[in-house]
Image: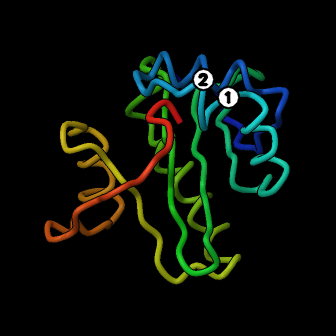
Amino acid sequence: MSESIEYRNLNPSDYDEIIRVWNEAGLGHKPKGRDNRDRMTVEISRAPDLFIGAFVKDKLIGTVIGSFDGRRGCVNRLAIVPQYRRQRIAEKLVAICEERLKKMGALVIYCLIDKENEPSLTLFSKRLGYHIHDGIVYLSKRDNWDA
């Protein structure tokens, strides 16, 4: 596809389109928890430069969300609708996110990927230069597993 792609910050008004992209991309979401409209509206207002979308003619086709804890930056929720994959849109979204995280002071940038998600593992480890750490185990504690 040779359509022009625009990369810009996402807004709370993009919420329904964000969820559509995640669903089309097979990413899924937690509507009763961390991905509900009110929570995401607050998150976008706190870090508007870390919610980034790829648009074709004002239609959202890809997302990435960054987070920064004051030391490390994290690349989250990378999703591209299937018909726009393999056009380096994901790479561009990650590059924009990384650049913004570095400007905030992140010295380490990481992502968490399910072992079964081979396309993302390949993208991050082979194309984007991320290192897989086999010796790290991810643990979490939650009051609500829908969060």
Q: The residue tagged with tag 1: helix, strand or loop? A: loop
- Residue lying at 45% horizontally and 42% vertically, measured from the top left: 88
Identify the element where label 2 is drawn.
Answer: loop
Residue 10: name its quadrant: top right
Most distant residue in the front direction: 143
Residue 104: % across, % down: 70, 76
- Identify the residue under disc 2: 31
Does the CB distance between marks 2 and 1 fall below 8 Å? yes
x, y (%) of residue 109? Answer: 47, 70
- Give the residue type that dot 2 points to: Pro
Q: Position of residue 57 (x, y in %)?
A: 75, 21
Q: Is residue 144 above or below residue 46?
A: above
Tag shown at residue 36: 1
Residue at image x 49%, y 30%?
146
Q: CA distance from mark 2 to mark 1?
A: 5 Å
- Position of residue 75 in the picture relative to residue 46 (left or right): left
Question: Which tag, 2 or 1, sits closer to the chain's start?
Answer: 2
